[in-house]
Image (spheres, rainbow, N blue to C red):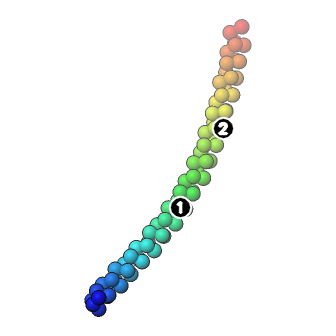
Amino acid sequence: MTYKGIFEEAMQLEKLKKRVKNLMEINKEHQMINGKLRSELSIEKKNHDLCRESNDLLNRENGRMMKKLSK
């Protein structure tokens, strides 16, 4: 292999190392964002369940009141 070939190979290797480092940083950021979104989604699911339960209770109470009024 010529000196030029060795130099080009070394340059390509450096570019690949930089690319891998960049991709690792992107992956780390992605994992952090994904974790935050999952926790937010969990909170929203809990809020939704609470609202649904509250809505069910209100519907039952409305039904009970309607029965009282219709008597």
Residue at 48 percent of width and 70 percent of height: 25
Q: Local crowd at mark 1 within 10 Å, few (<14), some, or many (≥20)?
A: few
Q: Residue furthest bottom?
A: 3
Q: Nearer the viewer, residue 45 or 20?
A: 20
**Left or right, residue 11 beside residue 30:** left
Quadrant assignment, res 60: top right
Q: Which mark is residue 31?
A: 1
User: Which amino acid, mark 2?
Assistant: Leu
Residue at 68 percent of width and 9 percent of height: 70
- The C terminus sits in image quarter: top right
Quadrant assignment, res 46: top right
Q: Which mark is residue 8?
A: none
Of marks 2 and 1, the one in the foreground: 1
Residue at 29 percent of width and 88 percent of height: 1
Task: Return the x and y of residue 34 as percentages of the image width and height.
Answer: 53, 57
Residue holding disc 2: 50
SS at mark 1 in the image: helix
